[in-house]
Image (cartoon, grey):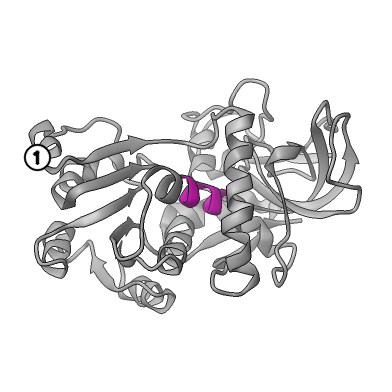
């Protein structure tokens, strides 16, 4: 088969479409013929040499895909050859075929085409696990998501609104903020022109945000804690703004607040399976009824993954960028 390889770490040009050995499913795994994959920030870090795949997983980038089951390993039940699926991966999505633990497979939701389904596994798993399974966002609470127009952000807005939360977002342009508003965001903050700490305080009569989903890390750590409401929960899922920051413990104690940080890629298979099962139970019905939908900015040929990486680096996109075969 062919896959995007990374012979040497570097810029987008480091991505090379090359012939590689065919994967073979083992115990509890299925083989998926990939129709589409999606580009995530983690893929950019892997290309740059900063985020290696977990031991034993595919060396190729790609944390999600959609396609058809073409082979089934021993010990797998509930799936058959020909099933159209999408999947959460530890790697290997930028390829013609990928082996997937059966617990990380999802059926393509009704009303979603197979290519578009590739936009779903990573964002739904990330948002549901962090915002709902860990931070326990509840109806009536105020939820702030940074990068509201990203793949994660557009999904977080919709899921938070679906449970009855009040949603605030940050983004860097009017176009992106307008799109977030169309998805249901109530409070629109241009981080280039406004201070999100003050904007959230003003919008909540000084109470603050009950839950914050943050992709920036160190750069926003102190300001996020300032923004939290009493009993607030800050969920950190990225480090685009650095890895080391100062945390005012006194502020955290006074607010009886919590800070969590998680990633999906390195979790044990059983934890991923649990998250995927929760997504199938709680999120898939919302997609089937049209209350939640995947947001796709554009598709790019998989062999030209370098172009897709440049799009993400420019941050001009809204929603997901997909790679198609």
Give the structural element (helix, strand or loop) at label 1. helix
Is residue 164 placed above or below 282 in the rendered structure?
Answer: below
Look at 50% across and 30% down and name the residue there: 51
Look at 36% across and 46% down and name the residue there: 135
Look at 83% across and 32% down and name the residue there: 23
Q: Based on the displayed image, in which of its 4 quarters is residue 195 positioned?
A: bottom left
Q: Based on the displayed image, in which of its 4 quarters is residue 273 positioned?
A: top right
Front position in the image: 101 or 163: 163
Numbered disc total: 1
Mark 1 nearby-residue class (10 Å; few <14, some 14–19, many ≥20): few
To which residue does mark 1 refer?
254
Magenta stretch prevailing secondary structure: helix
Give the magenta range: 122-129
Front position in the image: 290 or 263: 290
Left or right: 153, with 69 as reference point: left
Left or right: 195, with 92 as reference point: left
Front position in the image: 204 or 293: 204
Q: Position of residue 207 (x, y in %)?
A: 13, 59
Q: Position of residue 42 (x, y in %)?
A: 50, 40
Q: For residue 38, say whether it is visible.
A: no
What quarter of the picture does the C terminus occupy? Answer: bottom right
Left or right: 308, with 186 as reference point: right
């Amino acid at each position: 088969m062919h896959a995007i390889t990374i012979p040497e770490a570097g810029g987008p040009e480091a991505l090379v479409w090359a012939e590689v050995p065919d994967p073979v499913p083992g115990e509890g795994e299925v083989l998926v013929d990939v129709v589409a994959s999606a580009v995530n920030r983690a893929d950019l870090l892997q290309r740059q040499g900063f985020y290696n795949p977990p031991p034993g997983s595919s060396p190729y980038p790609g944390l999600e895909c959609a396609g058809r089951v073409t082979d089934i390993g021993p010990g797998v039940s509930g799936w058959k050859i020909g099933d159209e699926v999408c999947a959460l991966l530890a790697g290997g999505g930028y390829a013609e075929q990928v082996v997937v633990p059966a617990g990380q497979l999802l059926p393509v939701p009704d009303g979603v085409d197979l290519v578009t389904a590739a936009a779903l596994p990573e964002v739904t798993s990330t948002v549901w696990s962090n915002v709902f399974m860990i931070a326990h966002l509840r109806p009536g609470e105020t939820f702030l998501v940074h990068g509201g127009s990203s793949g994660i952000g557009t999904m977080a807005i919709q899921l938070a609104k679906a449970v009855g939360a009040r949603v605030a977002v940050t983004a860097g342009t009017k176009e992106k903020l307008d799109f977030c508003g169309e998805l249901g965001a109530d409070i629109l903050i241009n981080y280039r022109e406004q201070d999100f700490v003050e904007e959230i305080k003003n919008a909540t009569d000084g109470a603050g945000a009950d839950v914050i989903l943050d992709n920036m890390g160190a750069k926003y750590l102190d300001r996020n804690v300032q923004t939290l409401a009493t009993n607030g929960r800050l969920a950190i899922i990225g480090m685009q703004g650095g890895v080391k920051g100062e945390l005012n413990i006194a502020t955290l104690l006074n607010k009886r607040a919590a800070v969590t940080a998680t990633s999906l890629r390195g979790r044990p298979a059983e934890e991923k399976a649990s998250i995927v099962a929760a997504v199938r139970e709680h999120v898939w019905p919302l997609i089937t009824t049209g209350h939640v939908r995947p947001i796709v900015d554009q598709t790019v040929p998989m062999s030209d993954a370098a172009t897709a990486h440049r799009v993400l680096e420019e941050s001009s996109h809204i929603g997901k960028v997909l790679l198609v075969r």
